Image (tube, rainbow, N blue to C red):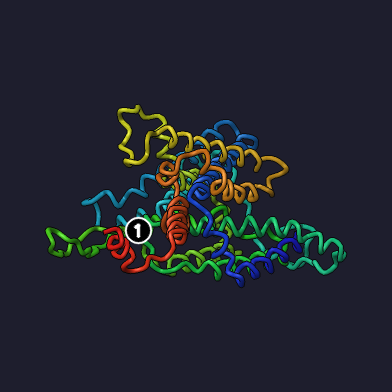
Amino acid sequence: MAWALIHAGWMHFILAVINAHHWTMRYVTTFSTEVFSLLNSIIYFHKAVQELERAHDHLSFAAFLYAVIGAIGTMLVAIFLSTAEQWRPLFHRYVRMGLAEYAAAISIIIFIGMPRVGELASLDRSTLHVNMSFKPSHPDRTVFFVQFWHLPVAWIFAAIIPGFIITALFFFDHEVSSIICTIDRYGTKKPSGFAWDIVLLGTTTALCGILGIPPANGLLPQAPLHSESLIHTEKEEILISVDGEEKVEHRDVKRVYEQRWSAFLHAGAILIFISPPCQHVLGWTPTSVLAGLFIFMGEQSLSVNPILYRFFHLLTPRSELPALPRDVKSYRGVHIYTIVQIVVTVVIFIVTLTKAAPAFPVLIIILVPIRLLLMNKLWDRETLRFVDAWACRKGTPEDDKDLLAGEVNEKDAGPTVPGMKLQSAASQA
């Protein structure tokens, strides 16, 4: 495993040096990113169920019932607090902002303390396992570093294959999550440092291999929850023309605070709590609270996924559906498109439960050529233009094809000679 992660590290460096983001992600559309986001939500929900299943196997029935209540309560309180910005005029604005931005943390603290009060304190509970001393957690290891140099050369080269699979997973995972967190609705202005992100990810991946620990890349390295917590409203001046006169109009525009402090402080807090003195505090955390956090993360990711709202349209009577653009004939193509996305997501999720799970990133990548080469033959252009778009740039694949077709027609027509039409008319006369 160590060499697989070391190989993945230098592969990340190569991807960053050649700026792989520019010539790979420019072909990705929201069809693939929405499927990937939905898959992440389902995985979050599945992880929550797994945590509760383990609680059921190791706890008494009464303790298990409270574990379920704790998981659902953690999720509901976090969702409730995340809406604090809408509680105006209740509390000061900064109080509402604090409640909304740290909704998950506040909910976790509440449900860590609750089972230690009153009669609940007598219930058995399953908590996070932590190491209380500064030494490797594996009983067979005496040093932190893996002696990876003792592996035969043949196995070192064989580890390139799993290293490539890990690289493909981490690269696509990080790129798509970065795209999801910087979409138009967040109004970001600063360019994303995709190459530097991949360098950092490659460094941490190789370091994890040397230390013999799982690679530290999360399910969503940059969660939409972070972007959502940093949204604020700004006044923007827009120049409009009314009856031939130009006027300045002020509009409310939602943007994200683009800063480094929140990520830096969160990283610092993580380093503090993984230190031996503070790990004891983490050991108080019931696994049911962790399950509730997974449900909350999945809900937050799902709530901003367009697939969810198009799925609601599937359940809506035709007379109640919102009007479509003039060029889109009916909702039939939109509904089929949504069903295909859901079915594809479920199939990929099933693959993640089998022995072929490490190859699931390949299935996500295959969706890119399928969208560009096959789906345009099954759906009409206007429907695809309505439901899909480029993930990293303006416009849609159909817009690019129209532009290319226009350029080809201009070349076929040849250059226009000034006065040609005038001379032709004179000769006819």
Along the viewing direction, whichever of 229 and 370 lies nearer the viewer: 370
| Residue type for callout 1 | Ile
Along the viewing direction, whichever of 326 and 206 lies nearer the viewer: 326
Q: Position of residue 424 (x, y in %)?
A: 32, 61
Q: Position of residue 156 (x, y in %)?
A: 82, 64
Is residue 27 toward the left or the right of residue 428 in the image?
right
User: Is 233 located above or below residue 312 in the figure?
Assistant: below
Observer able to see residue 181: no
User: Is 155 located above or below residue 32 in the figure?
Assistant: below
Q: Residues within 10 Å of mark 1 (few under 14, many from 20)?
A: some
Taking the spot 42% from the left edge, 52% from the top edge, the residue there is 106
What is the count of numbered marks?
1
The image quadrant of residue 135 is bottom right
Along the viewing direction, whichever of 194 and 421 lies nearer the viewer: 421
Query: Which quadrant does the N terminus fall into?
Result: bottom right
- Per the image, the residue denoted by label 1 is 231
The image quadrant of residue 311 is top left
Observer able to see residue 330: yes
Q: Position of residue 14 (x, y in %)?
A: 65, 69
Query: Which quadrant does the C terminus fall into?
Result: bottom left
Along the viewing direction, whichever of 263 and 415 lies nearer the viewer: 415
Q: Position of residue 325 (x, y in %)?
A: 33, 42
Taking the spot 53% from the left edge, 66% from the top edge, the residue there is 194
